[in-house]
Image (cartoon, coloured by chain):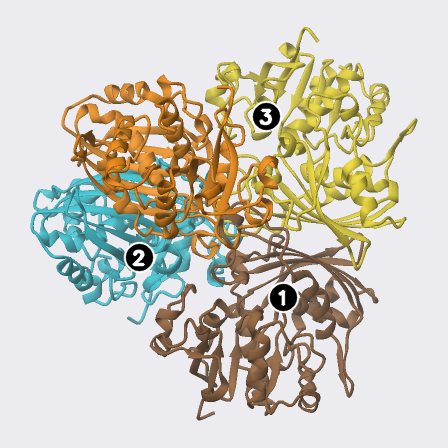
Chain colours: A yellow, B brown, C cyan, D orange
Amino acid sequence: MTTKIDVGILGATGMVGQEFVAALENHPWFRIAWLAASQRSAGKRYRDAAPWRLDRPMPTTVADMVVQRCEPSDSPMLVFSGLDSSVAGDIESDFANAGRTVVSNAKNYRMAEDVPLLIPEINPDHLNLLSQQSKARAWSGKIVTNPNCSTIVMTLALAPLCQFGLEQVMVTTLQAVSGAGYPGVSSLDILGNILPHIPGEESKMEEETQKLLGTVGADGIQPHDVVVSAQTTRVPVLNGHTTLISVKLTETPTEGNIVDAFRAYQGRPQVEELPSAPRHPIVYLTDPDRPQPKYDVNTEGGMSVTVGRLRNCPVLDYKFIALGHNTVRGAAGAAILNAELMKVDDLL
Amino acid sequence: MTTKIDVGILGATGMVGQEFVAALENHPWFRIAWLAASQRSAGKRYRDAAPWRLDRPMPTTVADMVVQRCEPSDSPMLVFSGLDSSVAGDIESDFANAGRTVVSNAKNYRMAEDVPLLIPEINPDHLNLLSQQSKARAWSGKIVTNPNCSTIVMTLALAPLCQFGLEQVMVTTLQAVSGAGYPGVSSLDILGNILPHIPGEESKMEEETQKLLGTVGADGIQPHDVVVSAQTTRVPVLNGHTTLISVKLTETPTEGNIVDAFRAYQGRPQVEELPSAPRHPIVYLTDPDRPQPKYDVNTEGGMSVTVGRLRNCPVLDYKFIALGHNTVRGAAGAAILNAELMKVDDLL
Amino acid sequence: MTTKIDVGILGATGMVGQEFVAALENHPWFRIAWLAASQRSAGKRYRDAAPWRLDRPMPTTVADMVVQRCEPSDSPMLVFSGLDSSVAGDIESDFANAGRTVVSNAKNYRMAEDVPLLIPEINPDHLNLLSQQSKARAWSGKIVTNPNCSTIVMTLALAPLCQFGLEQVMVTTLQAVSGAGYPGVSSLDILGNILPHIPGEESKMEEETQKLLGTVGADGIQPHDVVVSAQTTRVPVLNGHTTLISVKLTETPTEGNIVDAFRAYQGRPQVEELPSAPRHPIVYLTDPDRPQPKYDVNTEGGMSVTVGRLRNCPVLDYKFIALGHNTVRGAAGAAILNAELMKVDDLL
Amino acid sequence: MTTKIDVGILGATGMVGQEFVAALENHPWFRIAWLAASQRSAGKRYRDAAPWRLDRPMPTTVADMVVQRCEPSDSPMLVFSGLDSSVAGDIESDFANAGRTVVSNAKNYRMAEDVPLLIPEINPDHLNLLSQQSKARAWSGKIVTNPNCSTIVMTLALAPLCQFGLEQVMVTTLQAVSGAGYPGVSSLDILGNILPHIPGEESKMEEETQKLLGTVGADGIQPHDVVVSAQTTRVPVLNGHTTLISVKLTETPTEGNIVDAFRAYQGRPQVEELPSAPRHPIVYLTDPDRPQPKYDVNTEGGMSVTVGRLRNCPVLDYKFIALGHNTVRGAAGAAILNAELMKVDDLL
């Protein structure tokens, strides 16, 4: 590829926007050409508008760019959206309406029946929904979404089990504070404490998973009939959602069969060698006390989900632990991988 | 009661031992007369032998007591045991053999078929096992145990559901570091991290619960046939085990029925007004983001379990959260409540 | 005292306001009769308006009170102010102008030459400034302030050293997150981290101390000529400011002299036995690893400052550590103690 | 360099030993050929003997090496020592006696008058002491040491100020838990807490600094006459010692002079381009809230000290903050840099 594709970032000053900026800094295919945020930030240099909170320094290439309003007139044809859901609905449709391709991390269109909810390893064919989207909407552009952070971590770990007939899932999450943005969770709420409720999170995990694992046809998505029950908590961890999962399967694989399935798992990102794709979407660890956020969250640059402690579940069939980086694999990295797949499928 | 009963504490310098010391300081029925610990501590004053780590000061009444060896010759007739399981087996049987009543927090005899595993609200009649213990063992004394800390928290929350036919339980725990003793969990392992494995903890929750909820007869305990599946983790919280629970019930109570059952729940400790008994063994909280360790762990002096977020479970029937103080209700307070019940039942 | 004095709280929904509510719940002299906050909260019940973040439950007596606007018309004659400094200036002068006595924790009037900056143990005679305030201002009421939280902790520990000629003070603080209010410090900024800068804090410690220790005369306050140099940091601690202090003295007391001075220290609150007064304003601890927030922050209900590790300083003369509860002794408790002193001095 | 030099690691299973292993994995000059630890570990494979606690994986090249006893017979000629001070004294002299070059992080020989206490940027000429060491001791080998972790961080920040006449230093440290090894600091002691006492740490900072900045002559080291006063604390931070420093200088440089001095500072490691040398030993940050462990601890691979907030000190002359990575620049990286300097000086 000789020329990079210009991309814009909606909501560039927020935490997800910052992750987009960091992840795109040296991207081989995409080049940040345009940053947009709320009216309060517009007109300022990015270095002054964004309360940078990543542990890597702000890329110098963007530091002096002037932040724009979230209006499509001057934007590149491809925009990543890290917008807050309170504004993403209207802004993203404005951009799609103006011919832009919006690759969004916001929740607003995730469950729309004509919008792909995409994890490239799992359901690349859901991009076929775009032709239905094109018919159903007046948009000359399009919107593609990625799931909620905890859904992505869990569903990647569930995907290899679908071959054994995935029927039921019980999941408890221990989610990092970075998932709530900045300033997000107050230190008064989380130092030495557990927050047992993340509004809206459990229903996202229960509903998005069925769409993600569903099959796409002429009439849209036929959701998978897996039943998911989620309990979600916030814990004093900076990065990395830990999910404790039990599953009921139709078939009766051995532990060895399942570990093999985890380790063999790959999808189109690996086949196409997409720039952001991990070599191993799932890394199974055999030590009994892994995965742990401290050691495992950055596996393959944060794009792999680490899994461990597979064992029998006395109530369902098997239980295990899966961990993923919530702002990389669970947010900005997810959207970028989506755009990379769209690129090789000539959808940009 | 005009005269207090002299009691001893085995393992008095450890964290559970320290909790015994603190909880018994102003006890209306019991008086600390004797402290024992390992050979390394024996002969020292308690203030010099115990690395005090409670946030209340060491009672001055014990500070200058000389720590004894764990030998029954000079001990009072009633001893509380906070011994480590590596030594509790032999020492506790020595004391029982020497006619002492051992009320133990150690795991060694919990699952023995002739040893009561007691939560006074739940299974006070399990003390009837003592007559079988007396026949089966050569002991002139006896041993009574309390369950593991996370088991107690969960099982108290499950007990009111037994009336609806408790069939299956899925539980994930987020356990405080104080449950591991001192020095226990290294700061390098838990600052900003989650430990996904607590050796032996899951099987304790799965097995002890069946015994606890079982029925006692002439042949011993008939375990309850509830099936429990546990995933246990350690989190950076000082005190308070948070448990996320889903249950399958035979009957079909409404949410209101279950909340009523939680709130109405009481047992013999409440009827007898035992000194350490909470007025409400279970406190149901209606705020959607409760219970939290920060606010709720000390409810009724740490002897109540707080419960919240009751809602339907798509996989089983209902799910909810229960929180309890692991070193109070889950350890020293549990044993003391056991001894109080034994007192009113003339078993001391 | 047969009848309690009605009091109001300005900024009642904020963290300092919540501390006022909690501390006044069972006060023997004062009764909460009126709560006021910003326009956004006015008209709501307190339970709905205040994001309660104390670890004690909200007093039921105030939970259903309707929050008022910060206007003096219906307020009691005595109001405590926990207002944010962005609004405290105008509101507090409105109240003083309307005849109210404002006992404030806000910084706005602390350094005004006719406003007492009061720590009752240290400078009770600074209340004499009120006659100058009365002449200088058109107010029929009055304003009395307490110092910044870290200043109070440090200055209480310095006060007993004034008898030895206090010349220079170097201080580094490790301040708890509760000092920044709610939501205050973001968890993303403080989990596993240190914030080396608290805007404005260092100059407060350097300037307020001189006024506090100054002498009051007909012309107002003659500041103490002690020179203070402060470095202030925020640390992942919930409650309790730890201050590490070195001092240069004119005289040459021994360590024993200084420890004696710490332990003997008392002032009018102790003599008058004011309800909120600690018996010992300073508690000197001899263990080499004390004070610690975990164990010592609540000494005497959080109203005592604990001091330890007194030793020679190779650069100045002596160094030591002082710890105090920033929202109790350092904020709400400080203001209430001020009002109590004013009560016995017939200034209410 | 065509052939790498074989090196051994004493105390290879401890935290400093693990840091040596990680730092030497891809070293261009050195190759790990031998690992030694206590008798308890000897004979085991390294993967089984070392409780690996770094966030990078254990290098596969060492995982299967068999740990040896700390005896010089089979060891390489160059050994790094991460031994605990309780055993380092005898073992290191045994190795020196047997002709080995011991580059040690242990404290035992640091203050010996014939042993270099080395920071290559500051006092490379202190290696001249080795000829005196050779005369004074019966050793055919030699010992070179690096300072205590907090001393290194502070002294690197002080070194550029020596040109202005460094007279007095007041320092308070906020030290990370990794400085205490594994298991080291108990989570019960540090979660949400501050430990105000690190045994022996303050005197190390006060004494080692004078030797480090001293001049070497025919009679040994003439210590610098700077007077240092230290207060050291442990905080809930994983990596990175934050030091808050005030200095008194003979001359009167401007702030700009000092910032220039920080930024211009370099020494022989930079001139020689030693493999572990940072390009900038000191990185001065202009943001008012920096340095912070979260963002700055890994600057130049953890080998740079970051400095910020330079401003006037009302008591001494200037105050500022310096931060460094305690296990990299403050321990293993320090020793390796020492060995690199010795290599170019033909002292290996």
Quadrant housing the C terminus of chain C: bottom left
- Percent position (x, y) of residue A131? 85, 20
Instruction: Indicate which disc residue A17 carries.
Output: 3
* Mark 2 vs mark 1: in front: 1
Residue at x 37%, y 48% (from the top left corner):
D88
Question: Closer to the camera, D272 or D161?
Answer: D272
Question: Closer to the camera, B307 or A179?
Answer: A179
Q: CA distance from mark 2 to mark 3?
A: 46 Å
- Percent position (x, y) of residue B196? 63, 51
Amino acid type at circle 2 is Ile
Residue at x 68%, y 87% (from the top left corner):
B133
Location of residue B327 with respect to D178 vertically, above or below? below
Please give the residue where the numbered disc 1 appears in the rendered image.
B153
Q: Are marks 1 and 3 in contact (CB under 8 Å)?
A: no
Tag count: 3
Please give the residue where the numbered disc 2 appears in the rendered image.
C336
Give the secondary structure at mark 2: helix
Q: CA distance from mark 2 to mark 1?
A: 40 Å
Question: Closer to the camera, C103 or A160?
Answer: A160
Mark 1 residue crowding within 10 angstroms, few (<14) / some (14–19) / many (20+): many
